[in-house]
Image (tube, rainbow, N blue to C red):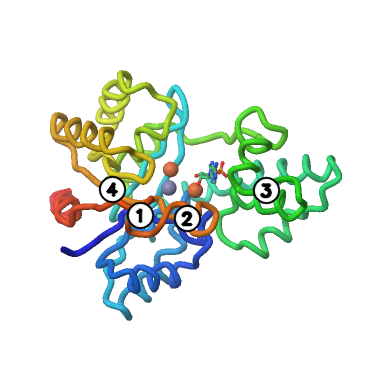
Amino acid sequence: MRRIDLHVHTTASDGTFSPAETVSLAHSLGLSAIAITDHDTVSGYSEAAAEGRKLDIEVIPGIELSTNYKGAVHILGYFIDPAHPELCRELQQIIDERDSRNRRIAARMQDDGINVSYDAMKERFGGSIGRPHFAEILMEHHLASSTADAFRRFLNKGGQYWIPRTLPSLEQCITLIRAAGGIPVLAHPFEYTYQQKSLPELIEVCMGFGLQGIECRHSIHDTGQMVYLEHLADEYGLLKTGGSDFHGEVKPDIRLGCGKGLLSVPEIWLDELKRAKQQS
Ligand code: AMP
Ligand code: FE
Ligand code: FE
Ligand code: ZN
């Protein structure tokens, strides 16, 4: 059986492996296809695709957008056109907004005597900067012992260095992905603060905006949750997807292709995604 992973971050956002390194790692693990789903950017795709052609691994252009709907919600987009003008324009706005939030986090750290320059961070990390990069800075200043510790103590909602982002709406995220030729999928439904009982409502709202799939298999979903989500997807006639949400060293317990060890994503789910793309 060919193994695939449809949820992968690189240094283009908050992963720690470059797009080429990620594809090369996928190759060494025997994967046949991966989707690059960086937060708010498609800038990692072309490098990953070039490496994919070299190593004969299929690389799918994707994205992960953050929004709020009674709490945090993430929407994945598959087979988007990375050069789509409206997509590029909207992503630039999201990135600019992220940038101004980041500058405020850095300023707050400086006020507390932490020697951090946001321009230097941009130079060093490249790509789309996020809280995991600030976690790195906090660790370097011995203020946190790990990424998780930095989030827990400083970067989560309510923490000293938590500054909310102004996000596109749920409808905007889904519409934008579709406008760029992509297939919108509700990411890791059990990572949110939703109770299981309110998930159908969220799915129905998303479907009203054009949602086409649910990420059923994910590193943080337990077996019961995965079975439940696959059942929900079938009931609603939605596509099923899955992936590890690999981020490299910032989430050391999550491995490419197998998540916390047992994750596997049926290749037929990718075939069905492709069929939906052809029909759209
Ligand atoms: P941002 O988009 O800059 O607000 O950062 C959010 C990102 O931080 C998420 O997409 C996760 O990848 C990452 N993140 C959130 N919580 C944690 C955590 N406890 N440990 C590592 N990474 C985290
Ligand atoms: Fe992330
Ligand atoms: Fe996510
Ligand atoms: Zn992700």
Which structural element holds mark 2?
A: loop
Residue in the picture at 42% in, 31% down: 192
Residue depth check, mark 1 versus mark 2: number of the one nearer the observer = 2
Q: Disc 2 beta carbon < 8 A from ligand 2? A: yes
Relative to 193, does residue 185 appear above or below in the rendering?
below
Q: For the point 66% across and 59% down, which residue is it?
A: 122
**Left or right, 164 with reference to 59:** right
The residue under label 2 is which amino acid type? Answer: His
Q: On residue 242, which mark appears?
A: 4
Badge 2 or badge 3: first in the primary sequence = 3
Residue extending farthest bottom? 54
Q: Position of residue 4 (x, y in %)?
A: 26, 60
> What type is the residue that disc 3 sits on?
Ser
Q: What residue type is labelled 4?
A: Gly
Q: Which mark is residue 62?
A: 1
Q: How crowded is mark 1: few (under 14 residues within 10 Å), some or many (20 or more)?
A: many
Helix, strand, or loop for circle 4?
A: strand
Q: Distance between the residues labelled 2 and 3?
A: 18 Å
Q: Distance between the residues labelled 3 and 1?
A: 32 Å
Q: Where is residue 146 in the image (x, y as percent from the top left)?
A: 63, 49
Q: Residue 145 carries which label?
A: 3
Query: Residue 226 sits in which quadrant?
Result: top left
